[in-house]
Amino acid sequence: MRRTTMLRDEFEKLRGTLVSLVGDVNFLFKNNQEVGNRRGGYFCLADGNGKPFFEPTQIGEVAVEKAEKYMQLCKEKAQRLASRPLIYCSSYESRNPEAGQWGGAIRLTNDHIFSFSGFPELLDEALMIILAETYYGKSAYYVALAEGIADRSNNHYYRALTVLLRPRN
């Protein structure tokens, strides 16, 4: 019971951080053609086997007709990443557009997979990289892992967000 409460508390902190990030994304990319009218999606925190700790949760605004699709994609991304060897850190590395399999899930450790679906896949991935960096801290090790994920997918959203969301003096 105590572990579940601790996980719930961690999940709620992550959820709160993600709500703020999605708000920033909606402001920063409101005129971005690729993002279009998408204003949110579903977030899933899964264990190393791809099993969600809790049901995926809606973050931001999601069109009713897209909700079930985004919820299922969120879980599928985490499960697909978990099924890959540990050298794979992103579901982008196993994307298959013909099969409807996209990027948007990442892992920086063996214990947690962060997954999101609702925006274009690289923006989903960028949000999860930044969320994971927030969760694990900005140590050189985690920053290098996060940047490696962004490099492998050539993630322009991650690059833009790290500049745009950088704290100002």
Image: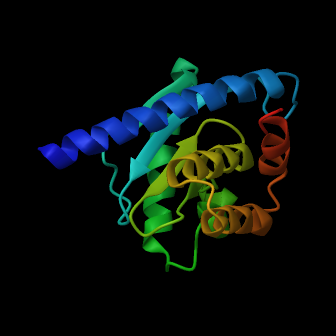
> From this viewpoint, is residue 152 visible?
yes
> From this viewpoint, is residue 55 visible?
no
- Quadrant of res 102: bottom right
Tell me where residue 20 appears, x and y as whole percent.
Answer: 61, 26
- Quadrant of res 97: bottom right
Q: Is 155 left, or right, of 40 in this rendering?
A: right
**Compared to 93, does 78 lie above or below?**
above
**Compared to 21, does 127 lie above or below?**
below
Q: Is 61 left, or right, of 51 in this rendering?
A: right
**Compared to 158, does 140 lie above or below?**
below
The residue positioned 78% from the left and 21% from the top of the image is 27
Tell me where residue 123 appears, x and y as whole percent.
Answer: 72, 43
Q: How many numbered circles are shown?
A: 0
Nearest the viewer among 127 and 93 is 127
Tell me where residue 163 appears, x and y as whole percent.
Answer: 85, 43
The residue positioned 38% from the left and 60% from the top of the image is 50
Seen as rendered, the residue at the extreme left is 1
The residue positioned 19% from the left and 49% from the top of the image is 3
Q: Is 35 left, or right, of 13 in this rendering?
A: right
Nearest the viewer among 139 and 148 is 139
Quadrant for the C terminus in the image? top right
